[in-house]
Amino acid sequence: MSKRGKKPSKDTELARVYGLHAAEAVLQGRPEAVVRVHAQDNRQDLRLGSLLEIATNLGLLIERCDSEQLDKLSHNERHQGVCIEVMPNQPRTEQELWQLLDNISLPLLLVLDGVQDPHNLGACLRSADAAGVHAVIAPRDRAAGLTATARKVATGAAEFVPFFQVSNLSRCLQQLQTRGIWRIGTDGETDVMYSDCDFKEPTALVLGSEGKGLRRLTREHCDQLVAIPMAGTVQSLNVSVAAGVCLFEAVRQRS
């Protein structure tokens, strides 16, 4: 048990963050949420040593364990010798979303329409963090949440990018419109290229789920549909790759 982290209640399901980069991001950004630090007992590399020094300076007790125990804690994902248990960074409410937007003059939002693979969600969160996205929005049902896998793939971004789960995505998109936010959806059937779109206005980039793309109602609530040109044999990009391409076009235009 840590010396300074919150003591969880019996009903609290702790989130697990594993991998050196993700663990360091949590230690630096949310040290008060750390409950336990597990480190591989026979690993002595410099990166792990630097991370454990940060944990020690924060007054956290480090629990040593073998590789097999870490494999179990990290669900057999690549843990790089460390797993941190934290009070979970919970998805925020719709009311908090509107409060957040009240204080942002030029929002850049990422809306995910039913992305179900936690690896893709984690990769989208990582791209969103790198692009300075103010919030990621996803439906509450039939979509991936902030699981341990999503947090690991996000390499720490899941602990910092505001993540909102809404009960009705179409209604949320309508409310974004009333706030003057331009809703840009990706669709391979349109002739408008993503690079021809104006991202310098308040923008919500809307991407669909793996394989199916945007649902009909979601597409109807977009102000503009754009495509990413495909020069090869594949018909579409992975949703996280598409998110990165479009988000960094927004970064380019805004800079």
Image (cartoon, grey):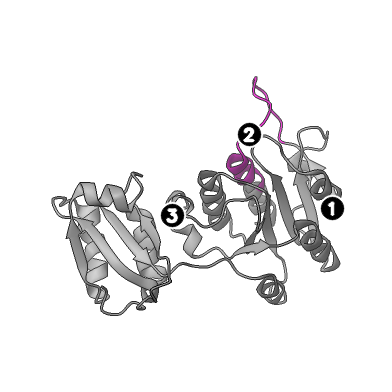
* Residue type, numbered disc 2: Leu
What is the crowding at mark 3: few (fewer than 14 residues within 10 Å), some, or many (at least 20)?
many
| Front in this rendered view, residue 189 or 41 | 41
What mark, if any, has residue 237 been given in the picture? Answer: 2
- Are the residues at dot 1 and dot 3 in contact (C-beta closer than 8 Å)? no
Question: CA–CA distance between discs 1 and 2?
Answer: 22 Å
Asked whether the viewer can see residue 80, the reply is: no
Badge 1 amino acid: His
Q: Contact (CB < 8 A) between labels 3 and 2? A: no
Tag nearer the camera, 3 or 2: 3
The dot on residue 148 is 3
**Residue 100 place in picture, x, y as percent:** 66, 74
Distance Cα–Cα, label 3 vs label 2: 24 Å
Identify the mark at residue 221; answer none if there is no mark: 1
Q: Which residue corresponds to the image point at 24% horizontal and 77% vertical from the top-left?
A: 59
Q: Magenta part of the protein: which range?
A: 228-246
**Residue pictured at 75% horizontal, 60% vertical:** 168
Asked whether disc 1 touches disc 2, contact meaning CB atoms under 8 Å apart, the reply is: no
Q: Which amino acid does label 3 sit on?
A: Ala
Residue 210 sits in quarter: top right
- For label 2, count other residues whose C-alpha is less than 10 Å away and answer few (under 14), some (14-19) or many (20+): some
- Secondary structure at badge 3 equals helix
Q: In which quarter of the image is residue 58?
A: bottom left
Numbered label attached to residue 158: none
Residue 50 at what x, y percent from top left? 23, 60
Q: How many angstroms separate mark 1 from mark 3 (CA)? A: 32 Å
